[in-house]
Image (spheres, rainbow, N blue to C red):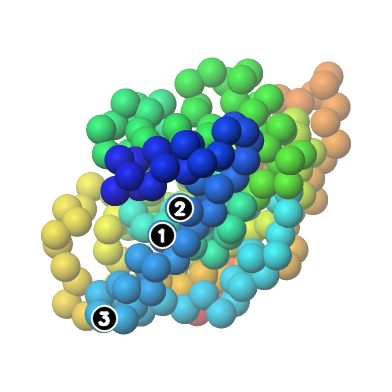
Amino acid sequence: MLSLIVFPVQRLLVRDKKVQKKIARRTVHYTFKFFIGMMGFVGIFKFDTTKAQQLKSLNGHLIMANHPSLIDVVVLISLIPNADCIVKTHLFKNVFLRGVVSNTGYISNADPQGLLDDCEASLKAGNNLIIFPQGTRTKLDDKLQFQRGAANIAIRCQANITSVMLKVIPSTLTKNVPWYRIPKTKAHFSAMVVDHSPTLPENNVSQTSKDVRQYNRDLENFFREELSKYE
């Protein structure tokens, strides 16, 4: 409905491309907010985002979160009016999602250098860029493991970091588990912003690779420790 009706109407009414993208992102934000509210109302999920409300007022932050379930990005965008995302290239060809990701101007991961430039431009424009350092959802019983992409973006863009801890109990909508496999009890989705994050090193070109590896390890250990404390 967004791709076939809402976004085309917005393009007819608004000619400025930047304004179009901004309005499209707001539209997705309110759509996801409604969707999350509906899931909570009918009792599919219980959502607790009271400890993540400060996400609403952020500007120009790189928001790092763990990735336990399929709806993580939906919940985060429902909390963040000016959210930007990094999406996989194949989603721009997906018949259901390509209209959304193209109209909102979400960032493609097709070109590594272009990705860094787009991330930096988005953050400077005041958008809050959501990224999952794991790169994909956590598999059941798997240890939390981060890819270096998030650390690389953080250091090269010298971004303001906000860390979000997500938990889904009992586990559902995880990697390699069919969406229709329903847990015996209602799933409880909770989100919490952690005020502190590992110290970001300066972007020293001569040792960027070394700094990225170390910062990635710091992030991984930080998330493991915070998630173990977060109940």
- Specify the farthest residue to the front: 13
Q: Position of residue 110 (x, y in %)?
A: 48, 21
Q: Categorize mark 2 by other alpha carbons within 10 Å: few (<14), some (14-19), many (20+).
A: many
Q: Categorize mark 3 by other alpha carbons within 10 Å: few (<14), some (14-19), many (20+).
A: few
Pointer 3 residue = 43
Q: Position of residue 150 (x, y in %)?
A: 60, 39
Image mark count = 3
Q: From where the camera sits, is residue 97 visible?
A: yes
Residues at circles 2 and 1 in contact by the CB criterion of under 8 Å: yes
Q: Residue at x 27, y 63 (%)?
A: 172
Residues at circles 3 and 1 in contact by the CB criterion of under 8 Å: no
What kind of residue is marked 2?
Answer: Val
**Which badge, 2 or 3, is on the more N-terminal residue?**
2
C-alpha distance separating marks 3 and 1: 18 Å
Q: Residue at x 34, y 54 (%)?
A: 70
Q: Residue at x 45, y 53 (%)?
A: 28
What kind of residue is marked 1?
Answer: Thr
Closer to us: mark 2 or mark 3?
A: 2
Q: Is residue 179 left or right of residue 114?
A: left
**Which badge, 3 or 1, is on the more N-terminal residue?**
1
Label disc, if present, on residue 31 of the rendered structure: 1
What kind of residue is marked 3?
Answer: Gly
C-alpha distance separating marks 2 and 3: 22 Å
Nearest to the observer: residue 212 or residue 105: 105
Q: Position of residue 19 (x, y in %)?
A: 62, 40
Identify the secondary structure beneath mark 2.
Answer: helix
Closer to us: mark 3 or mark 1?
A: 1
Relative to 162, is 24 above or below? above
Q: Position of residue 213 (x, y in %)?
A: 66, 34
Pointer 2 residue = 28
Q: Residue at x 27, y 58 (%)?
A: 173
